Image: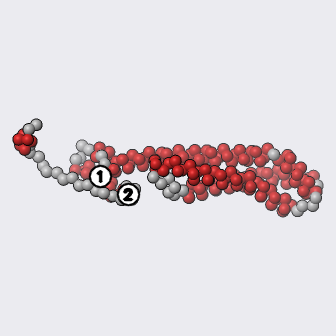
Amino acid sequence: MSHRNFLKIQGKPSQLTLLKTTGLAKNAGVLKQIAENQTNQFPGHMSIQQLGGAYPLYQVANVMFGGLEFVGFFLGLAFLTMLASCLMFKILSGVQPDRQRYYMLNRLGTRQNLIRRSIRRELGALFLLPGILGIIHVLFGLKMFVPLMGDPYVHLQTPFVIFLLLYLGYYLITLFIYEKLVVPSINMQS
């Protein structure tokens, strides 16, 4: 097209406004409103995703990382269940030799409350070390997601609180079953 033909074209003038933001997540509400205003200028012709720019990409990334978080939470819960179940069954499978050990302590005159405290501490140590190593492993492993997510350590306290509550629950259940299997045998044999 020649310059002369280009000058003959009649059209409405339009305006282009560029915005600079300090953070997409922080200003997502404002960016959404701007994108909706732009799509309202062309009713039925354009969606927010067709606009291009940072806000539609932010929406896509938000959906993608929401799914990634769900998968991470699901896998974390599955691994926690497997870890705690393995610990529980390992501890409960060793009840028979422990009965003899605690029976001997009872015969030597050890008080019941000291035997129970010993059981709590022994099981606590068996649960504590893998739990601490798991937390350290997660903290170092999240470094791998920094390029994808920016700051994967945001709101990390919530999953850790859930982990600690579930892990404590497994510990208490194991302790309850273990004491039911070991302590009555001490009383019956003495």
Determine crowd level at label 2: few under 14, some 14-19, many 20+ residues with C-alpha closer than 10 A: few
Residue 115 seen anywhere in this rendered image of the structure = yes
Identify which amino acid the numbered label 2 is placed on: Gly
- In the structure shown, which secondary structural element does the residue marked by tag 1 occupy? helix
Q: Residue at x 90, y 61 (%)?
A: 110
Residue at mark 2: 23
* Place of residue 74 in the rendered image (x, y in percent of width and height, measured from the top left): 56, 45
Residue at mark 1: 35
Counting the numbered discs, the total is 2
- Looking at the picture, tell me which residue is in the foreground, 131 or 88: 131
* Place of residue 181 in the rendered image (x, y in percent of width and height, measured from the top left): 82, 50
Marks 1 and 2, how far apart in space?
16 Å
Q: Residue at x 22, y 47 (%)?
A: 42
Q: Residue at x 91, y 57 (%)?
A: 106
Considering the image in quadrants, where does the N terminus appear?
Answer: top left
Determine crowd level at label 1: few under 14, some 14-19, many 20+ residues with C-alpha closer than 10 A: some
- In the structure shown, which secondary structural element does the residue marked by tag 2 occupy? loop
- Looking at the picture, tell me which residue is in the foreground, 55 or 174: 55
Q: How is the image coloured?
A: secondary structure
- Judge left or right: residue 95 versus residue 109: left
Considering the image in quadrants, where does the C terminus appear?
Answer: bottom right
Identify which amino acid the numbered label 1 is placed on: Ala
Q: Residue at x 81, y 54 (%)?
A: 179
Lower sequence index among marks 1 and 2: 2
